[in-house]
């Protein structure tokens, strides 16, 4: 390796045997707590590389950097790297649909300007926080030739690599190929995860792997985890993923497939110089550090929105179990009554409401619901020609003019939110469509839930009216396929560490009764834990009014008092796909929720000592067989013991005595 340039230090001549242990902590860009360090250098092939360590142990080995635009490339022939001074980043922001409501983000930041053999320049900004590393590219103007009128350029390829130590393990979701699946609606981030696989194992899909991607790093600590994602995807950007192949554990950034576009529009990022990419985000630390991290929103663009209309909530929803035939006036009225009885804030009226109910009757339902302090959401089909779905309202959101007319109508009717389905993937024009919808919805004070969609990538910070997004193999798949029901427990125990790690997730959880034509494999206590374990600004509970009548009073009381958002969350225990236990606080009430992702019974010991001083009333609900419940007394301590059946769960609720 030819040069190392770190934190304004002089270049260091190193041999090809250079390892990350050779980088002193005081000569690298380091985290505020000085545990994580990043090194940037030019290798013997004149290519830019970076590597990351934590506590002087390797997290990422030497990994490639670079970008190719339509008129320049920054891969080969890198001549120099010029570092800036280090600055401190300190930000505070609010989330309406996250695992905590008030977030503080601190990091050390440094820019490195790469110059190629044509004297063109690429700036790479690195940020290092106590829970990880982030970086993004910014192609700079060439003052010799770009000083005339702005010249449009586009991204052709990104050369970012993530080179993991061999013997590391991966938990990854393959992304379905575009234009496959039901009515050509893929990709929609709705696959099962490949769990605990070798890092060199290729994706079963040529399209690659989705973000966030989770890894357990092989090093001396044996307790280092890493999650890779991206954030700060603007309307001019495409969204990315990991490529399908990772020889010897070296992963590469992948591009969306050609069909993942708004019909007839652009696939890849474009604009005028200087052209900036989204952040590459790498959370690093123990599993607890990863699970508690907010990096996915820390790196997103701040909101400039008036948020007075943002009201997270719980919703009743007929379609989950009753499907298309339930989208009629009389049934929706029953689900409004159900929401009122459960003290929930919303009812969602799903597909084909425009044909089966119509605007006039919708207005009657909105007014009826308002009289019971319930708000109404309605469903829309986003698609034009990019899939063959027939559900309506369809094609009303495709242009700014028709979209704003539709949103103005809904606002005047008193509708509170829109669930919008069937997007085409991750191309730039499709990402612009998301931004346009969110901007226009905000103008008319409409909340938004995206389905058949991509990962939000921190958009809920930029647009707080985005309360949730699907992008998960959720409950509806359990109602369609026995395989999904068979895997519900292990799949659910994956999600807090992957899909739901940074972004709100509309899994649509919880039924305590039978699913038509499907054999349920989870206990009722497992189902009770899900709306606490899963984080979403709008939580759709699928159980029906009739189904809720079968549960004990103390369980109904918990469901009636489900928080609409969380002020604080803490990882308690778990392992991806096997166990997930989290504590979450809303106001002065704490919940501890856990699920067993495996079919065999287990006894777990939890450290709940931080709750000992809370006082108040302590209520624990566990299983009594597959479909029953019991309330137990529990002593909160450093060694709280809980017994779980296979595919089982529990909750503990600590409320003030008052």
Image (tube, rainbow, N blue to C red):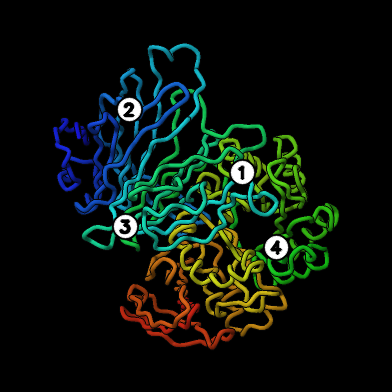
Q: CA distance from mark 4 to mark 3?
A: 45 Å
Mark 3 lies on a secondary structure that is loop
Q: In front of the other: label 4 or label 3?
A: 3
Q: Which of the 4 image quadrants contains residue 396? A: top right
Residue marked by disc 3: 168
* Callout 4: SS: strand
User: Label 2: few (<14), some or many (≥20) within 10 Å?
Assistant: few
Q: Disc 1 versus disc 4: distance between alpha carbons?
A: 21 Å
Q: Is residue 466 visible?
A: yes
Q: Which residue is mark 1?
A: 438
Whether label 1 touches label 2, CB < 8 Å: no
* Residue under label 2: 76
- Mark 4 vs mark 3: which is more N-terminal? 3
The mark nearer the N terminus, 2 or 4, is 2
What residue does disc 4 label?
347
In terms of sequence position, does the residue under pointer 1 or pointer 2 come before the other?
2
Which numbered dot is residue 216?
A: none
Tell me which residue sits at (61%, 84%) in the image.
553
In contact (CB < 8 Å): disc 2 and disc 3: no
Mark 1 and 4 residues: CB-CB less than 8 Å, in contact?
Answer: no
Query: What residue do we see at 39% from left, 48% from top?
Result: 246
């Amino acid at each position: 390796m030819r040069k190392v340039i770190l934190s304004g230090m002089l270049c260091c001549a190193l041999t090809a045997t250079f390892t990350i242990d050779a980088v002193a902590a005081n000569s690298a860009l380091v985290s505020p707590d000085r545990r994580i360090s990043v090194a940037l250098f030019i290798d013997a092939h004149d290519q830019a590389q970076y590597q990351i360590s934590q506590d002087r142990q390797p997290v990422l080995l030497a990994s490639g950097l670079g970008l190719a635009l339509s008129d320049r490339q920054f891969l080969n022939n890198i001549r120099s790297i010029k570092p800036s001074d280090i600055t401190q980043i300190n930000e505070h922001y609010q989330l309406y649909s996250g695992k905590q409501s008030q977030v503080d983000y601190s990091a050390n930041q440094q820019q490195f300007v790469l110059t190629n053999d044509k004297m063109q320049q690429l700036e790479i900004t690195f940020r290092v926080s106590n829970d990880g590393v982030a970086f993004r590219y910014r192609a700079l103007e060439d003052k010799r030739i770009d000083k005339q009128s702005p010249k449009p350029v586009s991204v052709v390829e990104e050369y970012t690599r993530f080179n993991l130590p061999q013997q590391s393990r991966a938990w990854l979701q393959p992304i379905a190929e575009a234009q496959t699946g039901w009515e050509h609606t893929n990709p929609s981030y709705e696959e099962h995860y490949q769990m605990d696989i070798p890092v060199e194992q290729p994706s079963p899909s040529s399209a690659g792997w989705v973000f966030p991607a989770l890894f357990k790093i092989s090093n001396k600590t044996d307790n280092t985890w890493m999650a890779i994602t991206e954030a700060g995807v603007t309307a001019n950007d495409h969204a990315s993923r990991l490529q399908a192949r990772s020889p010897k554990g070296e992963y590469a950034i992948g591009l969306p497939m050609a069909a993942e576009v708004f019909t007839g529009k652009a696939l890849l990022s474009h604009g005028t110089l200087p052209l900036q990419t989204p952040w590459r985000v790498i959370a690093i630390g123990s599993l607890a550090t990863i699970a508690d991290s907010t990096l996915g929103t820390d790196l997103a663009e701040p909101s400039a929105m008036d948020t007075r209309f943002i009201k997270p909530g719980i919703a009743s929803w007929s379609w989950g179990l009753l499907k298309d035939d339930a989208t009629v006036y009389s049934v929706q009225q029953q689900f409004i009554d159900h929401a009122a009885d459960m003290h929930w804030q919303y009812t969602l009226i799903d597909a084909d409401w425009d044909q089966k109910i119509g605007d006039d009757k919708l207005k009657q339902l909105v007014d009826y619901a308002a009289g019971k302090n319930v708000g109404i959401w309605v469903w829309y089909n986003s698609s034009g020609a990019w899939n063959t779905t027939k559900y309506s309202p369809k094609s009303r959101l495709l242009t700014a003019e028709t979209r704003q007319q539709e949103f103005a109508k809904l606002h005047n009717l008193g509708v509170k939110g829109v669930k919008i389905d069937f997007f085409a993937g991750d191309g730039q024009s499709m990402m612009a469509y998301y931004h346009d919808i969110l901007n226009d919805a905000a103008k008319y004070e409409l909340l938004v839930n995206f389905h058949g969609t991509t990962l939000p990538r921190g958009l809920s910070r930029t647009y707080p009216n985005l309360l949730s997004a699907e992008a998960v193999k959720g409950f509806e798949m359990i109602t369609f396929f026995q395989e999904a029901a068979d895997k519900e427990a292990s799949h659910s125990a994956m999600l807090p560490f992957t899909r739901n790690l940074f972004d709100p997730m509309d899994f649509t959880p919880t039924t305590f009764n039978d699913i038509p034509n499907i054999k349920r494999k989870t206990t009722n206590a497992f189902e009770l834990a899900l709306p606490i374990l899963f984080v979403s600004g709008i939580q759709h509970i699928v159980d029906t009014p009739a189904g809720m009548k079968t549960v004990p009073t103390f369980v109904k009381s918990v469901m009636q008092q489900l928080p609409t958002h969380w002020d604080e969350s803490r990882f308690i225990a778990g392992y991806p796909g096997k166990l997930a236990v989290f504590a979450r606080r809303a106001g002065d009430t704490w919940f501890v929720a856990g699920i067993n992702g495996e079919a065999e019974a287990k006894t777990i010991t939890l450290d709940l000592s931080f709750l000992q001083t809370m006082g108040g009333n302590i209520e624990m609900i566990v299983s009594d067989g597959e479909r029953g419940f019991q309330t137990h007394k529990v002593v909160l301590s450093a060694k709280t013991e809980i017994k779980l059946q296979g595919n089982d769960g529990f909750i503990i609720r600590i409320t003030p005595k008052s």
